[in-house]
Amino acid sequence: MCRSCGTDYSPPKTETPPKKLRPFHLAFPVDDLTSAKKFYTEVLGCSIGREKEESCVFNFYGHQIVAHKVTEMPDVSVSPVDGKEIPALHFGLVMEWEDWHQLKNKLESNHTEFVIGPYTRYENQPGSQATMFVKDPSGNHLEFKSFKDDNAIFDTSW
């Protein structure tokens, strides 16, 4: 149950299909809006929505993300996950398996620098997932991940 709007997104107990999820919204800081626009459109394939001198809206695979120009970027801490130093502050997408591989191939062919290159996290364990991290020009970390079985996305068995 969503605490904000009261919508129940849990799996249906009857044959009634669940409500369609709406796009999420995320605002994030950038210290160079021009470089951010280039990265999000040319590298990740986002389209641009509304633009102002201090912000830019992107269509991030059907979701609304907004880059807000700041004078100084926050520091980012890391924490160990599956033997890797994962940026604690990051955002991204859970993609369809084939879409993840297409994006991986695109990033590799464009010689995009990975913070953490494509690999399978938790291999042969519950929650096994393909994942990769990139960083935008302002230092924001983005994770793209995929599960062969979508039931593993919220799996509780560890």
Image: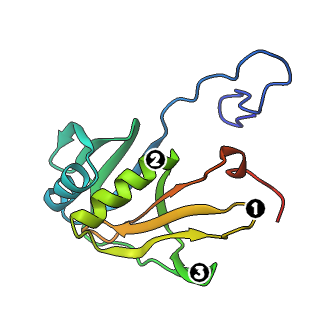
Quick one: 79 or 152, which is closer to the camera? 152
Q: Secondary structure at mark 2?
A: helix
The answer to which of marks 1 and 3 sits earlier in the sequence is 3
Q: Is residue 121 left or right of residue 50?
A: right
Q: Secondary structure at mark 1?
A: loop
Kindly identify which numbered label has been placed on residue 126.
1
Quick one: 104 or 15, which is closer to the camera? 104
The answer to which of marks 3 and 2 sits earlier in the sequence is 3
Kindly identify which numbered label has been placed on residue 98.
2
Q: Nearer the viewer, mark 1 or mark 2?
A: 2
Q: Nearer the viewer, mark 3 or mark 2?
A: 2
For mark 3, what is the residue?
79
Residue 105 to residue 148: above or below? below
Indicate the position of residue 74 as horizontal and vertical percent values.
39, 73
Q: Residue at x 65, y 45 (%)?
A: 150
Q: Nearer the viewer, mark 1 or mark 3?
A: 1
The answer to which of marks 1 and 2 sits earlier in the sequence is 2
Residue 36 to residue 12: above or below? below
- Give the position of the C terminus as an image quadrant: bottom right
- Are the residues at dot 3 and dot 2 in contact (C-beta closer than 8 Å)? no
Indicate the position of residue 80 as horizontal and vertical percent values.
61, 82
Q: Secondary structure at mark 3?
A: strand
Q: Is residue 76 left or right of residue 17?
A: left
Q: Amino acid at mark 3?
A: Ser
Q: Residue at x 33, y 59 (%)?
A: 105
Indicate the position of residue 78 as horizontal and vertical percent values.
53, 81
Q: Amino acid at mark 2?
A: Glu
Q: Is residue 45 left or right of residue 8?
A: left
Q: CA distance from mark 1 to mark 2?
A: 20 Å
Quick one: 67 or 109, which is closer to the camera? 109
**Occupied quadrant, residue 115:** bottom left
Sort mark 3 into few (<14), some (14-19) or many (20+) by Cα contacts within 10 Å: few
